[in-house]
Image (cartoon, helix red, strand yellow):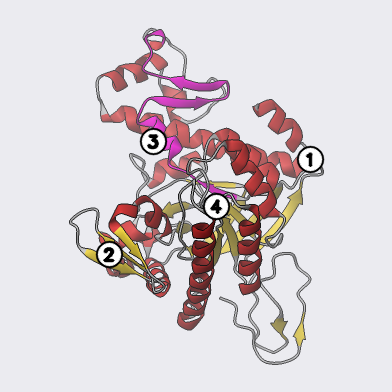
Amino acid sequence: MFLPPTGEEIVCSVVGCERQMGVTDDWVFVLSFEIVARANDSRARAGVLHTKDGDVQTPVFMPVGTLGAVKTLSPADLDEAGAQIVLGNTYHLHIRPGEDVVAHFGGLSRFAAWNKPTLTDSGGFQVFSLAENRKITEEGVTFRSHLDGASLFLSPEKSIEIQTKLGSSVMMCLDECVSNPSEYEYVEKSLALTTRWALRCKQYKEQVNSKQLLFGIVQGGVEHDLRQRSAGELAEIGFDGYAIGGLSVGEPNEVMYEVVDRVMGHIPTDKAHYLMGVGTPTDIITAIELGVDMFDCVMPTRNARHGRLFTSTGALDIKLEEHKMSGEPIDKGCNCYTCRNFTRGYLRHLFKSGEMLAFRLNSIHNITYYLSLVRGAREAIINGTFRGYKNLFH
């Protein structure tokens, strides 16, 4: 991280400068995020996230590799599809193989032979998804392992310690993701706890002098005043980027979009914006228009394993009888390995036969579709044609 040296302070004029810096012979400059283009008629922007492991062009979609692997896909598959950064799960990697094992191999990127940037969540989503097996206190969260029932404790400091050993490019603060609907009083109490945890995460990160980026997570359910409060409190603490968590957990899409729109007005515009766990292609295009830079979701690979494929003309169910004799690729406009080499008829045969190859080929296509979608959005923003790109998508 950037540690400001002593001396006269000046204000950095470059977009994305982390904070004020001192004037000295050996000052250190950190540019975590820079904006290279903005849309004329929306908040959509194209940027570059600078990490210790390389640059990430935004908008970007991050394939989910919970245990250090995106299901059925190799690093070579991801690279060919155009992936720039992969997400790993702190809770699951802590349980197996353990952060010390990953650190022994040089961090998550080297351990997985990915050799590109990675982002690790904090374990905060498991606070939500494993609600029946956890207990929250001021100090942190006590879980019962989903594998063997063993007790494990995750505090803000412990989460950052684990992520530091995992060596990810971007770390996330520990937070509590509340379910929807939830009582206002509980959401407000949870938000206050998340803010206190965020401060502890940053303090511990500074203590260990990590070079990893750290993102704060805006919470507050669907309550606009609480979301505004969360965004303001996190901005005051100061982070390398700001995520919006706690959405796509049961609320209508219109509500989700409204929450994102309002939050965008209260988080620093010169930092990366990350919408966690969202979502459908429509969600992503809409959120890009609202100013979001980063996305992750299990949807492309999970849908692939159920035979549901994304195309430029809408979703396709490869299990249907109508594809049995089809010699067409999944999508004539797609240049992925699957579409270049295999017919719908063959892919349907593989899926109906229970062949593992079906999962891999379907996943290659869906991941390529998602990555192409955000890459196209970036190009359109730079070229000043994002509105047309969005309309064409719809």
Residue pictured at 71% horizontal, 79% vertical: 20
Residue 253, x across and y down, in percent: 58, 37
* 352 shown above or below 376: above
Q: Which residue is mark 2?
A: 98
Q: Observer-nearest residue: 167 or 114?
A: 167
Front of the two marks 4 and 3:
4
* Numbered circle sitting on residue 221: 4
> In the rendered structure, which disc, 3 or 2, sits on the residue that comes first in sequence?
2
Give the spatial CA distance, label 1 vs label 3.
Answer: 34 Å
Q: In the structure shown, which secondary structural element does the residue marked by tag 1 occupy?
A: loop
> In the rendered structure, which disc, 1 or 3, sits on the residue that comes first in sequence?
3
Q: In the structure shown, which secondary structural element does the residue marked by tag 2 occupy?
A: loop
Tell me the amino acid under the disc marked 1.
Answer: Gly
Let me know if residue 352 is in the magenta part.
Answer: no
Q: Is residue 66 visible?
A: no
Tell me the amino acid under the disc marked 2.
Answer: Gly
